[in-house]
Amino acid sequence: MAEYLQARPEGEEHRIVDPTGRTLVHHEPQPGSFSGRPEIDRSALRDLLLDSLPGDTVVWRHRLVAATPRPDGGWELTFHGGHRTGCDILIGADGARSIVRSLLTDVQLSYVATLVELNIEDVNRRHPDLAELVGPGNLWCVGVNQILAAQRLGDGNLRVGISLRADDRPIDTYRSKRALLDMFGGWDPRLTALIEAGDSAPTPRPIEAMPTGTRWSSRPGVTLIGDAAHLMPPVGEGANQAMLDAAELAGRLAVNPADPDSAIRTYEEAMFNRIHPIAEMSARVPAMMLSPTAAEDIIRFFSARPAEPASAD
């Protein structure tokens, strides 16, 4: 029961507004309803997964820098600092800039947007007006080529995210609150208060993606899951698909332990087919929301499909 209590079905509520604060879309789940897609803080989910494993399963502070095939099969792994070990099956779950990915494909990442994050602590007590503005779920404020968003977290904090179209400005441009507020000049002050209330300096990072439809030829003893396999813009599917990758790959290997390469091939083919439409959607949503006609496009998008949560933690 404790595991369920970490989930927040009320976090599925989301509202999308324009720079004046006018509501464009409002999805509010019915009290007591459960659609199967509740929110859960990433840190809480990580702890639930880690706590289910023996204590020495995960070895921290070992950043992989190279993987080379062994003559007798399997892989020799080299970590930052010089530590080495070997494995029979190598599963690359090493994220956007995966070292393991290069063993299977030379696909290049593309820069699609800039995301700037801030955090507002103890929002109910310290900023009750912002707590009411955001509600229990997500708020997206959509302008021309820019988004100001906020998400309620289970610990009482707000995560604020600013999404901007990819450009040539240095990343440090976005480390100043003043510079960010200037970018949102003319917006309703109730919305830009989300920037002003940030408790730390803004943290910017480039958002990159792999080309939609990326595949590779299966190679014995190695495969990929999560962002290493299908890096997409963050619109709520990345963590979900990574966990599904892991579960499906584990299931294939458990069913066919005597022939792991066949299990990997079967997993990869199913994963490629599953991910393709999700990657297309994940590319389409930010392109739509970071456009000059975002408001009209969003109303049309949500009118044509069942309501879904605005994002996943």
Image (tube, helix red, strand yellow):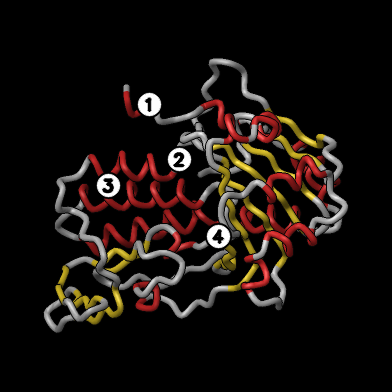
In the drawing, does residue 263 fall left or right of residue 290?
A: left
How many residues crowd mark 3 within 10 Å: few (<14), some (14–19), many (20+)? Answer: some
Q: Nearer the viewer, mark 3 or mark 1?
A: 1
Nearer the observer, 169 or 123: 123
| Residue 54 locus on image (x, y percent) | 15, 46
Tag of residue 267: none
Q: Earlier in the sequence, mark 4 or mark 2?
A: 2
Q: Quadrant of residue 104?
A: bottom left
Residue on which the image places disc 2: 41
Residue on which the image places disc 3: 251
Q: Residue furthest left?
A: 72
- The span from disc 4 to disc 3 (Cα, nearest Å) is 24 Å
Q: Amino acid at mark 2?
A: Asp
| Residue 206 locus on image (x, y percent) | 59, 68
Residue on which the image places disc 4: 232
- The span from disc 3 to disc 2 (Cα, nearest Å) is 26 Å
Tag of residue 4: 1
- The span from disc 4 to disc 1 (Cα, nearest Å) is 28 Å
